[in-house]
Amino acid sequence: MYAGANQGGREMEVMNGNRVLNKKAVPSFFNMEEILNENMMLGKSIQKNSHFGPKNHVGQEELEESEGLDKSYNHFRSLALASYFKDNTTGNHLIKTSRYAGYLAKKHGLPSKEIKNISIAALVHDVGKIGIPESIINKPALLNRDEIETVRTHTTIGEKILGPSDSDFIKTAKAMALTHHERWDGKGYPFGISKHDIPLEGRICAVADVFEALTSKRSYKETMSADSAIQIIDSDRGKAFDPRVVDIFRTNIDGILKIKNSFDGKEAINVLSKSIFPQGNEICFVA
């Protein structure tokens, strides 16, 4: 077991976890379904009244999907910015985890739309930490049992912030926010589900999340080398992590390290200031 593993609490928690029922109220202004619906209707209205319309039905669908992607990214980007302004460590964590998750999804062989959904979703996988007291998030020491239980509620808080929706983007984000601390062996949280009962997006995010957390400095720990982080993830293959996702991670570690190096030293605020989601290979910042 590595230092900080039982800090349920912070991004690197991958050890034992009990079900946590969140009792906290979430502000009503966080309604992603309403936000997306309003913007999609606005976009369609503008398009309908413009003489620059799509030339065919296929073009219409592609345009609407692209517009939906950009709007989803921009709204999720706003939530990530909210996390950044509360705690800039979390903001930086979200950016890199998003890129790692997108890259792992790509190497998993998933369709382009799912890759983008997963990368966007990972941007808000820890959005529930908005509801965790700063005194706990930024505590420069190990957490006590009560604090660990409090931090673990960020999974259920995140699900509530994202709210009910028929949007594929939000469904993916909710599943990831809720399950990225579940474990392959069933000892995770909040529900203690195991193996393929954990959504794929949660299993992918779990590896991306822990690698980023281990290789970054936190208020309670120093940076760990990439080699040491890889060894820890290897040791938890088939325990904390989906074996196939770990194998993909190991096989493509050069790409993961390229992403890491491209973001080391950058502030999240500079990345999140971009309003349009990266397209093509730029989604993962590697070829």
Image (spheres, rainbow, N blue to C red):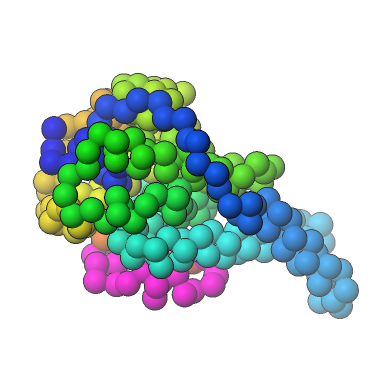
Q: Is residue 36 magenta?
A: no
Query: What residue appears at the point 57 percent right and 65 percent down from the top-left corner?
Result: 74
Q: Which image quadrant is residue 150 in?
A: top left
Q: What residue sits 53% from the left and 65% below the top?
A: 78
Quarter of the figure that contains the N terminus: top left
Figure check: 90 above or below 160: below
Residues drawn in magenta: 261-277
Q: Position of residue 37 (x, y in %)?
A: 73, 56
Q: Decide if residue 249 is in sight here.
A: no
Where is residue 98 drawn, in percent x and y? 40, 55
- Camera-nearest residue between 239 and 65: 239
In front of the other: 141 or 236: 141
Describe residue 70's horizontal placement relative to residue 230 as left or right. Answer: right
Q: Nearer the viewer, residue 40 or 107?
A: 40
Which residue is found at the position 38% from the left and 43% from the top?
Answer: 205
Q: x, y percentage for residue 51?
A: 86, 78
Q: Is residue 236 visible?
A: yes
The image quadrant that residue 203 belongs to is: top left
Residue 249 rendering spot, x and y as whole percentages: 28, 43
